[in-house]
Amino acid sequence: MAKGKPDNKDNASQRFMRATGKLRAIFGPANRSSLVHDMTEENRKLLAQRQAESQQWETITRPDGSTYVVPRNPEDKSLR
């Protein structure tokens, strides 16, 4: 093991949080929850619902480059 290097294998955000510990005392704590976890069944259902909702819309690009969103089916009033 090299001198000065920790033996554990933390991810980059955990190393950053440890290195900036004194700054957090001034600026406040940050969330240290794990980013590496399985999705819950509730989150899977919510993701499927959001993806289905997003399929109801399409993005139109104007010649000047600006964009706007319109419903794919104008008769569908379920989300309006």
Image (spheres, helix red, strand yellow):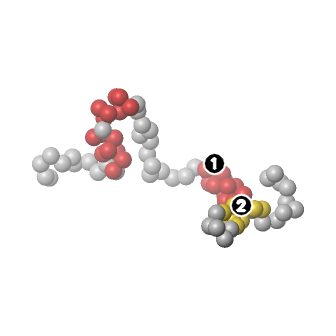
The type of residue carrying mark 2 is: Val
- Name the residue: 18% across, 48% down: 5
Q: Which residue is mark 2?
A: 69
- Mark 1 vs mark 2, foreground winner is 2
Quarter of the image where one finds residue 28: top left
- Name the residue: 85% across, 60% down: 76
- Name the residue: 34% across, 50% down: 11
Q: Residue furthest right?
A: 75
**Residue 42, which numbered label?**
1
Q: Is residue 6 above or below residue 61?
A: above
Can residue 55 be seen? Answer: no
Q: CA distance from mark 1 to mark 2?
A: 28 Å
Q: Position of residue 47 (x, y in %)?
A: 63, 55
- Name the residue: 81% across, 51% down: 80
Q: Residue furthest left?
A: 3
Q: Residue furthest bottom?
A: 63
Q: Secondary structure at mark 2?
A: strand
Whether residue 20 sits left or right of residue 54 in the image: it is left
Whether residue 23 sits left or right of residue 29 in the image: it is left
The type of residue carrying mark 1 is: Glu
Quarter of the image where one finds residue 67: bottom right
Quarter of the image where one finds residue 19: top left
In front here: 70 or 53?
Answer: 70
In front here: 14 or 67?
Answer: 67
Q: Secondary structure at mark 1?
A: helix
